[in-house]
Image (spheres, rainbow, N blue to C red):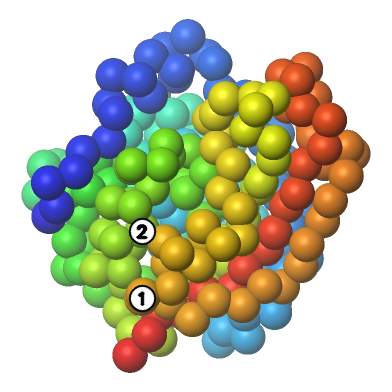
Amino acid sequence: MTGATMQADYWHQKWADNKIGFHQERANKRLEHHWPELGLAGDETVFVPLCGKSLDMLWLHRQGLSVLGVELSEKAVQSFFSDNALTCEQHESDGFLVFTGTAEAQGIQILVGDYFSLTPDHLHHCKALYDRASLIAMNQDMRSSYAAHLGRLLAPGTRGLLLAISYDEGRMEGPPFSVPQENVHELLGEHFDIGELAHYSGPERLGNLADRGLETLDERVYVLTRNP
């Protein structure tokens, strides 16, 4: 456990007010296109930090993967199962409220609680990582703690997909925050080998950020491999 904690009140309020512009109504196209490039065996357990009610978890599960998510908001996790007509069981363990999928959702487990309360024991079975909206959800100070804790949590050899965006911070204040290429390497380079799989740029990338003052946006897709 680290001394850092998530900004719980902030994120609980976002979900309470339904201000969840970060939620996508379909599986992420970058995930669908680039996940096979990781070259994984195909039956791994994938860790999805700050998972919300992301449909990306369903996509990963449908590929034959197990999913372990962590999320502060119980409302988000309840919505994930109810919105997708999935069944689950609940119990408490190590300070987390644990939602374990049953029937069609067997293999999906989401821990409700603080990411920074996770220990390597919680992730001992995870051999893969997917981060679409975690790193970019953190302000600059919190990003450093997030990245350092991620390095502590994941076992050597763990491979994952990281999606990050960058933009003119003079035009918009996050979240989502701008995390340029050099910042990704500064944050994660100590614990991970980092490779860039793709770079997309242009105003057509803005999506629901188009009304927040931005004229263009850069998206980068990285493959991460936890160092020995």
Quadrant in which residue 14 is drawn: top left
Which residue is labeled 2 in the image? 147
Above or below 160: residue 178 = above
Q: Amino acid at mark 2?
A: Ala
At 38% across and 24% down in the image, what residue appears?
Answer: 11
Quadrant of the frame with the N terminus: bottom left
Above or below 62: residue 80 = above
**Which numbered disc, 2 or 1, marks the residue that appears first in the sequence?**
2
Q: Are marks 2 and 1 in contact (CB under 8 Å)?
A: yes
Q: Amino acid at mark 1?
A: His
At 41% across and 42% down in the image, what residue appears?
Answer: 140
Percent across and percent down for residue 101 are: 40, 49
At 52% across and 61% down in the image, what residue appears?
Answer: 184
Label 1 CA crowd tier, 10 Å (few <14, some 14–19, many 20+): some
Q: Can see residue 185?
A: yes
Tell which residue pokes out farthest to the top in this image: 17
Which residue is labeled 1 in the image? 191
Q: Secondary structure at mark 2?
A: helix
In-image side of 122 versus 172 (left or right): left
At 52% across and 14% down in the image, what residue appears?
Answer: 18
Front residue of 187 and 29: 187
Percent across and percent down for residue 38 are: 62, 80
Percent across and percent down for residue 195 are: 61, 77
Q: Which mark is residue 64?
A: none
